[in-house]
Image (spheres, grey):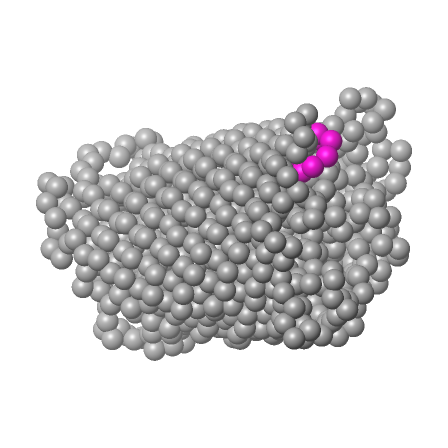
Amino acid sequence: MLSIRIVRPRRVLLASAAFTSFAVIDLPSASAQQVRDPLPPIEVSPVQSREQARPAGREGQSPRRPTARRSATAAGAPKPVTTVSAAQTQAQTPLNSNTVAESASRLGLTVRETPATVEVISAQTMREQGYRTVSEVAAGAVGVTSGDNPAEPAAFSMRGFTNSQINTLYNGIKIGPQNMTSRITDTANLEAVEFLKGPASLISGEGAAGGAINFVTKQPHTGPIRNEADFSWDSLNSFRAHYGSGGSTNVQGLDYRFDVSRSSLNGFADDTNTKTLDVSGQLNYRISDSLKVWGAIEYREDRSKAYWGAPLVPVAYSGSHATSGIVSGNYVSNYNGTNLGAVTIDDRTFNTNYNVLDNRNVAQEVWLRGGFELKLAPDLTLKSQAYGYGAERSWFNNEVEAFNSGSNLVDRERFYVAHSQRLVGNITDLIWDANIAGFDNRLVTTLSSSYLDFVRPGAANFPGDSVSLVDPNRGYYGLLTTQQQTARIDNEALSFEDRLKLTRSFALVGGLRVEHIGLDRNSTDKNGLEKAGFPFTKDWAPVTGRIGYTWEAIPGLTFFSQYATGADISANNIFLLGPTQNLDLTTARTYETGVKHLFWGNRAEWSFAAYDILRKNVYAAAGGQTLNIAGRQESKGVELAAAVRPIEPLRLWGNIAYVDARYADYNFAGGSFSGNTPPNVPRIVANAGASYRFFTPWPVEVGISGRHVGDRYNTDANVVTMKAYTVADVYAFVDIPKTVFNAVDQARLTFRVRNITDKRYAIWGDPFYPDQILLGAPRTYELSAAFKW
């Protein structure tokens, strides 16, 4: 049994939805399956198209082809009440299962046709539910939680796994370890967020033990140019603004999309805010019936004055200011070793910022992507994209806030780190549609490669001080001394994914991925001298895959099961890996089965899944930058989601997830955490919502959504509980008739109240900083306006 103490190298910082409600769409019924003009005789689209899946294999030609499914706008569906721009690229269903999620499969399958749990949150749902950041998107997804920890700007928990055990993808591309590269991301430029649950290494490579979350930017459509503009302001004096435009140009075959968004989100704690800027654009050019090329560019930046949480304080010290219902437990400070006894959050610290006055948290990112799709033969298509990515990030903060029961002061400690990252790569797919012994078959062969260069200057000294709990003198960072670490990762992978239709309703879906990962690391001290054991290199060659089936027992009712595997680098943090550590791969496997059902004239849909995940050779954070080998991590659970429109004006939706996640064989010098629950993993997560539309001359819709998150722990020790909480948001919007603004096709004004009961709760706990807890935002009010023309 091994315990490893790493002196302040800092976990390199981690980069959230209601279950998709009924889409309110207005599509010509004759073309519900193909909203965006295809490129005859094949569909050609850049990676992460939102288009409706075409039939796999030769279904369009074979006598085995099933009867065409009714579209979401078929007879019996509710009458559309609003118009969606031509960029909306699929006929949505109540749970959005009619969408192709290419982060879940390269076979062009819809969510219903994929033998796994996949959830897609559309841009329309993000607007309706008021999701401003990807963390808020995840908060409404089935069984997903997140915390926007400034150390991990988009930290997620899903199916019992958190942080770096979940891959974060951008348009299907992994840019590096999630706990180092993810950032706070505004939703304005996104077309969708995809959630693939469970080990997902077949598609996204190493690091996906708990699943993958894919952010998809808005893309061009073929048709008339459509413009949109959005503005919002809230009671914390936050604002957001977005403009987007897309459609066909005067050049035959050339389509475009352009978006620019700006936000300034103020926090509830003193002197905290996040400013973002995102500019993205893409061109699609259909050169001929068989060839299409495309190119995309994106620039993003975010700048924050960060909130690092409220310190755990002894109940005995807080007295009448002690709160209940936020945290509970007895705690000995991990940082200063003093015994705090029973702990609480002092109500005088709700809005207190303990960060230094000159703190900053900054990132700038640039994406370049381009590729082509070529029809080589009637049954053979070649797709390829090349990409380049660059990022500069820095954190300059006071990050430790530990109450000292000896002095009754808050002990603080500074930390600095910066990233200079460069990534280049290519993904090439060869798609072969065939008929094997009379059975429709589609085979996708994918060759991918990437090279990542990461330079990480960081603090070599950690200035500290102590301040009062109430009205602290925040001061400044002080003297900074730096050292440097570097990491280079090359990755090559060959994968195969296949779908064989044995009958019109039963299909086998499987795949295999063979991958090579090479890591080169170096570390120098403040004088530029190499540290002991450096440089060093390490290679891994994981083989992962998936095998499953889908069976559409009756039209709309699909059963599925799968067995899938995943792998990731031990500790999944390339800068916490030392030359003397156990560098074996961490492996994961899942068994999953479930059902997806679309019925009642496409007005109702539900899904259910049960799973069993096992992860071996697990490293876990034990506080103070300590890593323990946790042996195994086991996770079993069920998920249920449903949405229905019983009458035309009324929409109802809800979801609930239960997970039993625990460690096994987690023994170390001085104790054992076997049987304990991993941090930030609640047993129960539930969401529900309803909306009602009044068909008046100025149509009005009112809605409510609620969320319940169960008890969680902030560390593997499970001694401090972040208590369960329930929060609710309400909204009302009015659609202004076109007669009021002749130049605008659609205009909507929305009033929203977030956390209407003003609940105070713990939203996240950082196991590396266990002396403090991140609190959720109090009640806020928001006004927004949206226009389309």
Residue 678 percent location from the top left of the image: 42, 66
- Residue sitting at x 79%, y 39%: 83
Q: Does 776 sit above or below residue 223?
A: below
Q: Is residue 561 visible?
A: yes
- Residue sitting at x 41%, y 76%: 675
The image quadrant that residue 552 belongs to is bottom right
- Residue sitting at x 20%, y 36%: 480
Q: Does 665 sit above or below residue 542?
A: below
Closer to the camera in the image, 108 or 420: 108
Q: Does 649 sit above or below residue 732?
A: below
Image quarter in which the C terminus is found: top right
Residue furthest bottom in the image: 665
Residue 298 percent location from the top left of the image: 49, 34
Q: Which residues are magenta?
A: 220-226
Left or right: 99, with 533 as reference point: right
User: What is the chief secondary structure element of the magenta stretch?
Assistant: loop
Q: Does 138 sit above or below residue 467?
A: below
Residue 100 percent location from the top left of the image: 64, 54
The image quadrant that residue 666 belongs to is bottom left
Left or right: 388, with 592 as reference point: left
Closer to the camera in the image, 154 or 56: 56
Residue 487 percent location from the top left of the image: 26, 49
- Residue sitting at x 50%, y 64%: 496
